[in-house]
Image (cartoon, coloured by chain):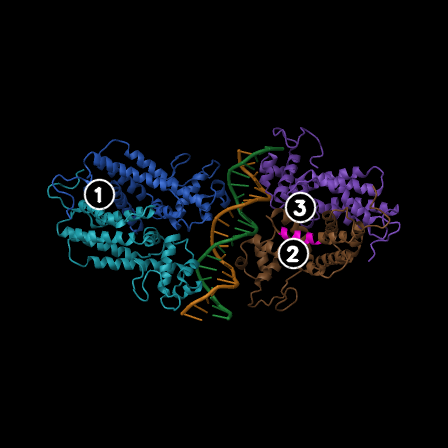
Chain colours: A brown, B purple, C blue, D cyan, E orange, F green
Amino acid sequence: MPRSKPTASSGTADYPAGRGGEKYQRILDAAIAVIAENGFFQSRVSEIAERAGVADGTIYLYFRNKEQVLMAAIDAAFGAFLERARRELEPASPPSEKLRRLARLHLGALGSNRAMAIVFQTELRHSAKFLAQFSQHSLVTYFDMIRQVVREGQQQGVFRREISDKIAANCFFGALDEMVTSWMLSDRDYPLVGAADAVVDVIVAGLETRPANGPSQR
Amino acid sequence: MPRSKPTASSGTADYPAGRGGEKYQRILDAAIAVIAENGFFQSRVSEIAERAGVADGTIYLYFRNKEQVLMAAIDAAFGAFLERARRELEPASPPSEKLRRLARLHLGALGSNRAMAIVFQTELRHSAKFLAQFSQHSLVTYFDMIRQVVREGQQQGVFRREISDKIAANCFFGALDEMVTSWMLSDRDYPLVGAADAVVDVIVAGLETRPANGPSQR
Amino acid sequence: MPRSKPTASSGTADYPAGRGGEKYQRILDAAIAVIAENGFFQSRVSEIAERAGVADGTIYLYFRNKEQVLMAAIDAAFGAFLERARRELEPASPPSEKLRRLARLHLGALGSNRAMAIVFQTELRHSAKFLAQFSQHSLVTYFDMIRQVVREGQQQGVFRREISDKIAANCFFGALDEMVTSWMLSDRDYPLVGAADAVVDVIVAGLETRPANGPSQR
Amino acid sequence: MPRSKPTASSGTADYPAGRGGEKYQRILDAAIAVIAENGFFQSRVSEIAERAGVADGTIYLYFRNKEQVLMAAIDAAFGAFLERARRELEPASPPSEKLRRLARLHLGALGSNRAMAIVFQTELRHSAKFLAQFSQHSLVTYFDMIRQVVREGQQQGVFRREISDKIAANCFFGALDEMVTSWMLSDRDYPLVGAADAVVDVIVAGLETRPANGPSQR
DNA sequence: AATGAATGAGTCTTCATTCAT
DNA sequence: GATGAATGAAGACTCATTCAT
């Protein structure tokens, strides 16, 4: 979910240093890295500047203040993720397949970028609570995508209609989310994306209509 | 999930103010409230002191530093929650019933104490990442409780054996967790515990063995 | 025009350093000295703190911010001056005599305290213009005192009635003011108060009614 | 008292914007305006540049640093004023008449240009104290002009000889100065020059020899 | 000559922590 | 034990000045 513009050079962090104007993006990338390391409120502007290879004051040519830097960084990262998710869903396919694609994307994207994972699992929701109307839009958008898939499944008769789409989406997202969190907190570095199918297996089974069996009888 | 020891006085916040003694607990309670309002790193020692009705310096008679106050507060709150969870599981009952009890406890406890919910959803995991191995123990303990129930179900043949107990626990916990998060971020104050059964319905259905139907066929 | 409360010790700058609570006054005095040396906007909080013998942070226990320190310092100094002026005028005496007392006070007070003179001549009016509604009250009060004396003289028939009391007060104050300014800018340190009578001589002569002679014929 | 060289264009602020050449003067004019608005030390180079319609860096092609810009601006303005004053005094006329001309020029010039008035009343003397010997020359020159008129009057027997010409000049200048200051600080926009005669009336009456009456008897 | 993006030194202000009372 | 005045280290932000273009 890194820089969307694959402009100059390439790699992951070898900015040409020369003129160009990609400083804005360099700062955002640096901010993500610093936030992942220290947390939103513990991040120092001077550290972001240093890691971005610019002077402290330069930050303020691109952002109004520290908060704006951090929020822009998280927003940009999440926006890129959202964009990919949207593309994943484009092709017509069965709802359960769509959920599988989302799950793989979710775990794949975060599982391949630990810094981003840390930011999403800890700072994103933290921010959602403590920074005025932060990123609410993106989060809600992602949720709505999931709910939409659930409703499709219900309309097609493959998902149980008595389950609220909101709760279903919470279960799906929550399960993936927890996978990421435990991976993030783990010392081991197992391939997170490998768990996507297993999670989808559980949640989809929980949502599907069952020919003979009714839902879990109480 | 406030003070577990119904010691002196009672109510919710009417500390005798005069005598000394339960100052320790007063500080912990104040810390939870302040953290919920401002977040861990945005919380001021002086605000905690003021809300606890003690002088700033007094805090340092009970805790080494700010971090210790906050961690002790979160630990105490989580410990009380764990204790209740342990009691819930005592009676022998079917695994799916145990999960239902846990779900109701989880959503009931946090749904009745917004400050605590905020702290758990935002600061606990934030802390888990940023404060040296904070609370790992309690979180792991909670998780192990859930995994144990899953394994029981698998041994009894009611839960599918091909699902990793760890992933199953993640799905269960993650689903509940997400319910709390979306409730916490919501402006509306609907009864959170009311969603417990629906969540359990989805997850348990996802875990259960099915007579005819295999797991979600790809 | 220094500290009004001749409490502890005495002298001019030997604060007991021990406990007491006179830090507020120490800071005000230090502020006047620093302003006189550097000007209002060039004054550094850290320099004021150092000269007052307190830590930087201590300043903020007594004042909201730097601007408040500086304004309080100027206000306090001018207020003390005003108080003295008010006492000077108490005894009933001829208007010309009152003006002479004011002139001597004005030149005497500032002529004996160069730092204060600098602050009054440069920062006071500077502030009057650039700091919202700063000290307007004190300045206006001083002016009104002078105008009142002029009106008394006019009512008693010793000062010409065709001269606006406002213009007369401006002439009187302006003349004194200019004496202070040129003294302040001068390298020599002549006794400023020595010029009081000469100034009064010119201004009073300009205000007085003349038996034979009319006013300066055009 | 703005641009002395009636070079290109004319008006008050219609610089061709396009061609280069009179940038120096544009910067000086902008500086006066900005200083009047913010005060010397509160003025930003970037604001002067913007108002002059040049880039920030361009300022440094014409001036060594910010201080030089501001001092040059004040000097130029004051120099233009001095030049006019000198011309006013050229024609042979009675000393009291010369003083009247100076008074009208002084109040007329500043009364017609509030920005200039602000700069003169607040920044000029401020600068005199805080900027190394700034503008001393011009101020002294103006003063000497006044003193010279006073001495002429004394030699001609119309002004009292027992009054020091320096004190007399201070009274005259101080009275005018105060008129300007109170006008500048006033919210109302009365015609300042209208007070010239009244002021001269008082001061000249104070200086003149009186046939019968001695000077104000003590 | 002119530009304006970039720099980084300089300051105010906050707040965890101490310690004399 | 309790207090809270005092401390001073740390960090966000500004803005005069430079220099590659």
Residue under pointer 1: C203
Q: Which residues are magenta?
A: A135-145
Which chain's residue wears label 2? A
Q: Is residue B79 visible?
A: no
Q: Amino acid at mark 1?
A: Ile
- What is the secondary structure assignment of the residue under circle 2? helix
Packing grade of label 2 (10 A; few <14, some 14-19, many >=20) is: many
**Does D168 sit left or right of B64 as displayed?**
left
At which x and y percent is residue C119?
36, 46
At which x and y percent is residue B10?
67, 29
D69 above or below C47?
below
Task: Say whether marks 3 and 2 touch (CB < 8 Å).
Answer: no
In three-dimensional space, the C-alpha distance between marks 2 and 1, rounded to whole angstroms, equals: 77 Å
Q: Quadrant of residue D18?
A: bottom left
**Does A208 sit left or right of B192 as displayed?**
right
Which chain's residue wears label 3? B
Q: Is residue C202 magenta?
A: no
C20 above or below C124?
above
Which chain's residue wears label 1? C
At which x and y percent is residue B55?
58, 36
In the rendered structure, find residue A78 and report the number of the disc placed on it.
Answer: 2
In three-dimensional space, the C-alpha distance between marks 3 and 1, rounded to whole angstroms, equals: 75 Å
Packing grade of label 1 (10 A; few <14, some 14-19, many >=20) is: many
Of badges 3 and 1, nearer the viewer stands 3
In three-dimensional space, the C-alpha distance between marks 3 and 2, rounded to whole angstroms, equals: 21 Å
Residue at position x 58%, y 38% from top? B56
Residue under pointer 3: B123
Question: Overall secondary structure of the magenta stretch?
Answer: helix
